[in-house]
Image: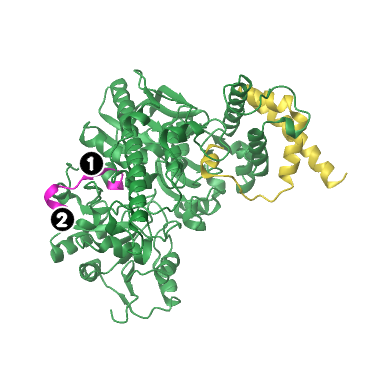
Chain colours: A green, B yellow
């Protein structure tokens, strides 16, 4: 049976093809269109999946959309109604309005609902099934949908290595739901508890993300990074916003947030009264005078240091509260399911600090779907249909995150030929390749590393990576200045051989397939005695978001780490995504050449071909 | 029939279909909204369908919820 799952229309469009219970291919549209978080219909991702599997669209048995569009619109109307009733009752600002009095003109429709209705008609969001049928030229009855959190549940459980697990989803909002606890057993997922709007930990985190000057759906990682520089001085104030219920659920106090009918910002004047003015996007951030330009006056520097501390403390506070909530929900889910196996999905599951605590402090056997956000729902939608509608036996678990575009040697040759770069070496073996690359890395070079099939999910895992020497204290600054141009408070992550991970990081790696560290989805402390050994990847709070690599999970990358160890004594490399700021990760050799040509990367490795930006190789 | 009249007729047909689908799905909030505000919704839809299909939404936060 061939099932195509697709997500689009909101953010992070993607497609995934399930063939007889195996994930044949999966891809995110942004990698092909080069538009970060592209929400358009995933034409190119679908074409890739079909081509990769050698399947024609006519041969696909079912096409499954990842959420229920009509239910989502029903929620939007419901939310507007709730808000209008609150206004009519004088509870909030704005003149009273009675929604259900029949509107005779558009001005009688509440502005929020008018804007959404307009958007939905303009972008054909009501009829996702019809849109899919039309785009792919398939009969309408071949297309169906599953609910948003059912897609997340399926992505979390069916791709996990567990036969029995607690399954937890947490995100901003799907149709109505924002979090679900379920029990997975075999091919069945049984829901036990659902939390619905307006109570959403994902939206709360996003509200603080916006308040801290970062883009929602993109800047949540930056909040985590900034938290390391702060103390949770506002813990009590943030914690007051959250009520943890005995049944594993939670509630969010609404006076500080506009989660029902947001017009622009997700927080209210009450939020500003409690937490002060929002941080300006791109505002200077520094925790010590030496991080700031010399030409600032002492007063200017002092103000930047003060505000930086304030916002870092807020980031630390919301991060701690989020971790506490996640630990609470997962503890209850585990108790309900009667197992320590836990599967997570939904955007909140990308909170790698919380994931690290779930592993280290709580001892769960954790699986986090690598594309835990809505992109992963392409797999989830297909998997949900396959098991829960088609009643097929349990699909194969997630064997590898390398499900994307393969590196085609013909494309490499063609891209390099027109690149204008002249210093090119193509090695005859992987052994020769890793010796060469480890040599230049040990010499301080920054390397663009493109191997095999691209990663599924937001993390670069040694297929579309930028690599550098983790032992070099200057390397974070070098990579930032030459290619990434990121805020200085954001950490860089390490890739480490699994066998050496516990020597450098304070956790015992679970080498079973599917451990979050394979997908760089958990943060762990760097061992105290090793912090000075690997300064480039040790964050301000002494932690790192670790990727473990084995000879089975990624043979060439593992061999490179071992080769680097022979030269520098440390089997660890800085591993960051191969992209420029604001762009998606490179996908094709042509993408890689382009990024290489306009950045300060020293060497580009495409399979066994090494291209140098230097005069001499 | 003029283009705008044809568009208006199409929109009304679509609203009829949506009302039926919302009712069939048990989505009473949306069904009632479209039923009670049909004329206004039709105007919104006609205006929307005359615009290019570009995305100009106010913020990623709002976008992610819609």
Give the total number of marks visible in the rendering: 2
Disc number placed over residue B59 in the picture, else none: none
Q: Position of residue A467 (x, y in %)?
A: 29, 62
| A6 relative to A348 in the view: left or right | right
Residue A217 sits in quarter: top left
Q: Which residue is mark 1?
A: A512
Q: Which residues are magenta?
A: A518-533
Q: Position of residue A118 (x, y in %)?
A: 68, 39
Tag 1: Cα neighbours inside 10 Å, few (<14), some, or many (≥20)?
Answer: few
Residue at 15%, 66% in the rendered image: A567
Label ID, residue A532: 2
Mark 2 / mark 1, whichever is N-terminal:
1
Q: Which chain does the numbered disc 1 sit on?
A: A
Q: Secondary structure at mark 2?
A: loop
Q: Nearer the viewer, residue A2 or A603?
A: A603
Residue A233 in percent (x, y) is at 30, 35
Label 1: element kind? loop
């Amino acid at each position: 049976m061939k099932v195509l799952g697709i997500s689009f229309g909101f953010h992070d469009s993607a497609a995934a093809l399930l063939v007889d219970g195996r994930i044949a291919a999966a891809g995110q549209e942004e990698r092909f269109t080069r538009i970060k978080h592209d929400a358009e219909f995933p034409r190119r991702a679908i074409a890739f999946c079909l081509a990769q599997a050698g399947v024609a669209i006519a041969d696909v048995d079912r096409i499954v959309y990842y959420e229920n569009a009509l239910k989502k619109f029903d929620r939007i109307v419901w939310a507007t109604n709730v808000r209008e009733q609150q206004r009519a009752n004088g509870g909030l600002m704005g003149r009273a309005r009675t929604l259900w009095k029949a509107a005779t003109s558009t001005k009688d429709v509440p502005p929020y609902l008018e804007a959404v209705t307009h958007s939905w008609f303009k972008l054909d969001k009501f009829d996702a099934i019809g849109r899919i049928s039309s785009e792919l030229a398939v009969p309408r009855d071949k297309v169906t949908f599953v609910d948003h959190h059912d897609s997340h549940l399926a992505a979390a459980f069916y791709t996990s290595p567990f036969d029995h697990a607690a399954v937890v989803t947490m995100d901003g909002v799907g149709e109505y739901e924002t979090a679900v606890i379920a029990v997975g057993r075999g091919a069945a997922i049984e829901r036990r508890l659902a939390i619905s709007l307006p109570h959403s930990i994902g939206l709360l985190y996003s509200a603080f993300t916006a308040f801290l000057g970062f883009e929602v759906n993109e800047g949540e990682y930056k909040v985590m990074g900034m938290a390391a520089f702060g103390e949770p001085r506002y813990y009590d104030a943030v914690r007051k916003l959250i009520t943890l219920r005995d049944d594993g659920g939670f509630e969010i106090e609404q006076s500080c947030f506009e989660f029902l009918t947001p017009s622009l910002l997700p927080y209210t004047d009450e939020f500003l009264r409690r937490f002060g003015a929002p941080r300006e996007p791109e505002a200077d951030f520094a925790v010590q005078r030496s991080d700031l330009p010399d030409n600032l006056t002492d007063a200017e520097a002092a103000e930047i240091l003060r505000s930086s501390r304030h916002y870092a403390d807020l980031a630390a506070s919301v991060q701690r509260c989020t971790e506490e909530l996640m630990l609470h929900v997962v503890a209850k889910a585990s108790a309900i399911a009667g197992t320590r196996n836990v599967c997570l999905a939904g955007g909140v599951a990308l909170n790698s600090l919380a994931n690290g605590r779930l592993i280290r402090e709580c001892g769960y056997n954790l699986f986090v779907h690598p594309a835990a956000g809505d992109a992963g729902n392409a797999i989830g939608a297909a998997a949900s249909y396959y098991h829960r509608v088609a009643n097929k036996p349990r699909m194969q678990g997630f064997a590898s995150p390398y499900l994307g575009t393969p590196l085609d040697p013909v494309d490499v040759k063609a891209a390099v030929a027109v690149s204008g770069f002249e210093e090119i070496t193509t090695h005859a073996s992987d052994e020769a390749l890793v010796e060469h690359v480890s040599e230049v890395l040990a010499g301080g070079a920054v390397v663009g590393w493109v191997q095999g099939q691209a990663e599924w999910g937001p993390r670069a895992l040694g297929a579309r990576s930028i690599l550098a020497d983790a032992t070099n204290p200057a390397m974070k600054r070098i990579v930032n200045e030459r290619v990434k141009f990121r805020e200085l408070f954001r950490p860089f992550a390490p890739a480490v051989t699994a066998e050496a991970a516990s020597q450098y990081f304070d956790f015992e790696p679970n080498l079973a397939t599917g451990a979050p560290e394979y997908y760089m989805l958990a943060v762990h402390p760097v061992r105290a005695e090793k912090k000075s050994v690997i300064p480039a990847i040790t964050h301000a709070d002494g932690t790192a978001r670790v990727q473990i690599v084995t000879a089975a999970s990624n043979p060439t990358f593992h061999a490179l780490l071992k080769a680097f160890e022979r030269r520098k004594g440390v089997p660890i490399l800085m591993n960051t995504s191969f992209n420029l700021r604001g762009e998606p990760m490179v996908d094709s050799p042509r993408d890689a050449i382009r990024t290489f040509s306009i950045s300060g990367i020293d060497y580009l490795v495409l399979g066994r071909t090494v291209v140098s930006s230097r005069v001499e190789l | 029939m003029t283009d705008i009249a044809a568009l208006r007729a199409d929109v009304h047909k679509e609203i009829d279909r949506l009302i039926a689908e919302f009712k069939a799905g048990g989505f009473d909030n949306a069904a009632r909204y479209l039923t009670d505000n049909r004329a206004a919704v039709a105007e919104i839809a006609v205006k929307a369908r005359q615009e290019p299909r570009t995305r100009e939404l106010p913020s990623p936060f709002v976008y992610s919820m819609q």
